[in-house]
């Protein structure tokens, strides 16, 4: 569990490192959409990672997961759908 201090209030966002480990075990990042096996838009990532906002938190867990994935080389690209997405190949 990750705790963030924001404007003198404690807000907790639940993230699970095992979700990221499973994603990285299954996919590798690429920079070219034409060679990607999968294009994960934010909506698709939310479903794949189970990153749904919680009523008791102002933070979106998808943002935390995206930050973790960015640290592992998965960066958002503007896709041909006109949305940001992760470009991946299946391992």
Image (spheres, rainbow, N blue to C red):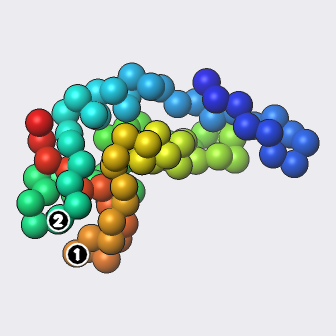
Which mark, by number, is residue 33?
2
Q: How far apart are marks 1 and 2 (CA)?
A: 8 Å
The crowd level at tag 2 (other Cα within 10 Å; few <14, some 14-19, many 20+) is some
- The residue that label 1 is drawn on is 80
- Residue for point 87% across, 48% down: 7
Residue 34 is situated, as x and y percent measured from the top left of the image, at: 10, 66
- Would you say residue 3 is visible in this rendering? yes
- Residue for point 47% across, 26% down: 16
Looking at the image, do the residues carrying marks 1 and 2 touch, with CB atoms under 8 Å apart? Answer: yes
- Residue for point 73% across, 37% down: 4
- Is 62 in front, or is 31? 31
Residue extending farthest right: 8
Left-right relation of 5 to 18: right
Local secondary structure at mark 2: helix
The crowd level at tag 1 (other Cα within 10 Å; few <14, some 14-19, many 20+) is few
**Relative vertical location of residue 5 with respect to residue 74 in this rendering, above or below:** above
- Would you say residue 51 is visible in this rendering? no
Local secondary structure at mark 1: loop
Residue 76 is situated, as x and y percent measured from the top left of the image, at: 37, 60
């Amino acid at each position: 569990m990750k705790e963030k201090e924001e404007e003198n209030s404690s807000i907790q966002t639940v993230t699970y490192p095992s979700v990221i480990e499973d994603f990285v075990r299954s996919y590798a990042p690429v920079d070219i959409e034409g060679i990607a096996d999968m294009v994960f838009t934010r909506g698709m990532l939310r479903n794949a990672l189970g990153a749904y906002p919680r009523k008791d938190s102002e933070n979106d867990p998808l943002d935390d997961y995206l930050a973790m994935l960015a640290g592992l080389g998965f960066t958002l690209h503007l896709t041909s759908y006109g949305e940001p997405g992760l470009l991946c190949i299946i391992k």
